[in-house]
């Protein structure tokens, strides 16, 4: 297996990965969707799943696949034609994935996101809940940008940025970016075949952006620049990023084993601390929940989610998704987190178990008042 870098071993310990597959790889250099390659990646993702790793797939390729199906040899300039190509290509792309995952008896799910979905807090939380539910059901979400509704001003354009935001969204430990280059080189290898692979660096190292160039394939969008920026974004929530050659034999499995492939870009802080800081920096505190002793213990020592049954009082006015502080009986703040029910709903369900939510609220959404992934202990 060769030499293994210690920090790469951390990848195998990660419980949640985002795997991004770029256009250039997926479309077999413009000749339609590469079904054989997709089968190979899907088989390896199925292996990760068996090892208990939850995977969100971010897949490009809709426009390129649509161009092929429409018989267009050149990428159109007009946004409407690009959107039409994406619509034709996306349905084909997910069909290929669904078949491939079906061979392993794994359900897949299409998620199309746009900028508003990630910048509007309610939609952000809804997207997060759906992704989390899909993962808990053992399904593989397949994410792409919702190309048919986005305009130039608001589109991500490249899926590297989208993949990093999804890594933030689901609290991923690792972002694996598969592309047609074997990683980030000291120069674009298309310009200089002797360029050297950068094996490992801090995601925030400013020199990386100097060596990262644009895309050349005419199929991909962002090149290495957007991949380095994606690593910086992912690092904010504590995820490490690995950029690797997707055409390499069994690349996902080998990366999981810690083989020194590709470029590993690490967050500077301890991942958990970075994630919590990121979460804390997101929003202002809008209210408080006063916990009973049992709930305080469950949060502090048990690393549990906060359930309404352990809440004694609600203070302030807040909406679903707001940041609230959790205080003990003495009024001391012990945690902060993103709340799943607004202040009036929280007041109605306090002290009650989630089984009573339907009687008390008329609906039952999340079982937890604050999920532990969204909770920062102080
Ligand atoms: N320093 C670099 N190291 C490696 N590749 C680079 C570098 N600078 C630019 N590139 C280009 O980035 C391309 C990968 O990005 P892109 O075409 O956007 O692919 P994808 O569709 O997978 O996102 C490579 O094919 C390569 O030409
Ligand atoms: N949403 C677009 C992805 C755009 C794109 O090519 O992204 P990337 O492969 O990351 O450079 C599509 O599916 O065609």
Image (cartoon, grey):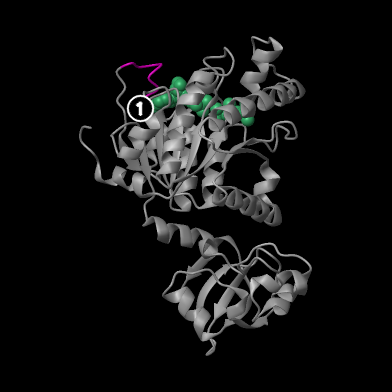
Q: Position of residue 283 (x, y in %)?
A: 60, 63
Residue 153 in which image quadrant: top right
* Magenta region includes residue 189: yes
- Dominant secondary structure, magenta: loop
Beta carbon at label 1 within 8 Å of ligand 1: yes
Q: Is residue 135 above or below residue 83?
A: below
How many circles with numbers are drawn on the protein?
Answer: 1
Residue 215 showing in the rendered view: no
Q: Position of residue 223 (x, y in %)?
A: 49, 27
Question: Left or right: 247 with respect to 333?
Answer: left
Q: Nearer the viewer, residue 208 or 62?
A: 62
Q: Position of residue 221 (x, y in %)?
A: 56, 26
Q: Quadrant of the N terminus?
A: top left
Question: Left or right: 77 with respect to 49?
Answer: right
Determine whether the residue tagged by mark 1 lies in a helix, strand or loop: loop
Question: Where is mark 1, residue-wise?
Answer: 185
Question: Left or right: 135 with respect to 12?
Answer: right
* Magenta region includes residue 207: no
Q: Nearer the viewer, residue 325 or 216?
A: 325
Residue at 43% across / 72% down in the picture?
A: 302
């Amino acid at each position: 297996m060769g030499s293994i870098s210690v920090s790469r071993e951390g990848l195998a310990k990660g419980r949640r990965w985002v795997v991004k597959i770029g256009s250039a790889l997926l479309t077999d250099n413009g000749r339609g969707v590469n079904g054989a390659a997709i089968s190979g990646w899907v088989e390896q993702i199925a292996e990760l799943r068996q090892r208990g790793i939850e995977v969100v797939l971010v897949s490009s390729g809709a426009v390129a696949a649509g161009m092929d199906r429409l018989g267009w040899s050149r990428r159109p300039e007009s946004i409407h034609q690009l959107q039409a190509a994406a619509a034709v290509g996306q349905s084909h792309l997910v069909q290929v994935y669904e078949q491939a995952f079906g061979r392993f008896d794994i359900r897949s799910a299409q998620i199309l996101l746009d900028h508003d979905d990630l910048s509007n807090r309610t939609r952000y939380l809804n997207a997060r809940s759906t992704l989390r539910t899909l993962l808990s059901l053992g399904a593989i979400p397949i994410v792409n940008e919702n190309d048919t509704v986005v305009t130039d001003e608001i589109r991500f354009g490249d899926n590297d940025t989208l993949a990093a935001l999804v890594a933030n969204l689901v609290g991923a430990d690792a972002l694996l970016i598969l592309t047609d280059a074997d990683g980030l080189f000291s120069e674009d290898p298309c310009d200089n075949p002797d360029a050297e692979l950068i094996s490992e660096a801090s995601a925030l190292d400013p020199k990386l952006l100097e060596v990262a160039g644009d895309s050349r394939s005419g199929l991909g969008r962002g090149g290495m620049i957007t991949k380095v920026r994606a690593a910086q974004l992912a690092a904010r929530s504590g995820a490490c990023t690995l950029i690797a050659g997707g055409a390499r034999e069994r690349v996902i499995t080998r990366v999981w084993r810690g083989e020194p492939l590709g470029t590993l870009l690490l967050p500077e802080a301890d991942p958990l601390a970075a994630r919590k800081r990121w979460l804390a920096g997101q929003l202002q505190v809008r209210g408080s929940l006063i916990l009973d002793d049992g709930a305080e213990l469950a949060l502090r020592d048990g690393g549990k989610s906060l359930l309404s049954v352990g809440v004694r009082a609600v203070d302030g006015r807040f909406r679903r998704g707001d940041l609230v502080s959790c205080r003990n009986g003495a009024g001391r703040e012990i945690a902060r987190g993103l709340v799943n029910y607004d202040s009036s709903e929280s007041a109605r369900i306090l002290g009650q178990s989630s089984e009573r939510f339907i009687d008390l609220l008329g609906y039952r959404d999340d079982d937890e008042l604050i999920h532990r992934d969204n909770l920062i202990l102080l």
